[in-house]
Image: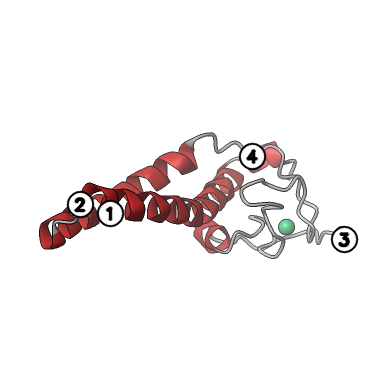
Amino acid sequence: MVRKAPSHFPRIRPTRTGIRCRCPRCGQGEIYNGLLTVTNCCACCGLDLSPHDTGDGASVFVIFILGALIVPLVFWFEVAFAPPIWLHLMIWPPVIMVLGVAFLRPVKATLIAIHFKNLRHKYNE
Ligand SMILES: [Zn+2]
């Protein structure tokens, strides 16, 4: 259900709405209707989110962030404990997949909020 949209929305910092995965205009509505599927329209303010275009940007940022976090951890684990290779294969892929999804949601929402902030005319504002 779409509530009536107020005529003016205060500017909200993209990082604030992005980390909470909320609508970049009102800061209240959910931006996702699935794990990583962006909703077509904000349920609170009615903002059409279909013009968003983050492309692969969020994935690239997450790859860099996870690489900077995981690679030193793997090296430390190898030097400290010298585990067999099968133990590395049991530990790191699940850690990377879980952290990847956990980071991808807020990073993608932040990029959508930055896109909305800088290209409001594309969102029929
Ligand atoms: Zn909204």
Q: Is residue 85 visible?
A: yes
Sequence-first tag of 4 and 3:
3
As displayed, is residue 25 above or below residue 85?
A: below
| Residue underneath mark 4 | 52
- Measure the C-alpha gap from mark 4 to mark 3: 22 Å
Does the beta carbon at disc 3 come under 8 Å from ligand 1? no
Mark 1 residue crowding within 10 angstroms, few (<14) / some (14–19) / many (20+) = few
| Residue underneath mark 1 | 87
Does the beta carbon at disc 2 come under 8 Å from ligand 1? no
Give amino acid for label 2.
Answer: Pro
Mark 2 residue crowding within 10 angstroms, few (<14) / some (14–19) / many (20+) = few
Q: Quadrant of residue 50?
A: top right
Q: Is residue 76 left or right of residue 9?
A: left
Q: Tag 4's secondary structure?
A: loop
Sequence-first tag of 4 and 2:
4
Give amino acid for label 4.
Answer: His
Q: Tag 1's secondary structure?
A: helix
| Res. 4 mark | 3
Ligand 1 lies in quarter: bottom right
| Residue underneath mark 2 | 84
Q: Is residue 96 left or right of residue 47?
A: left
Could you tell me if the residues under marks 4 and 3 are in contact, i.e. CB atoms within 8 Å? no
Task: From the viewer's side, name the closer residue of 9 and 106.
Answer: 106
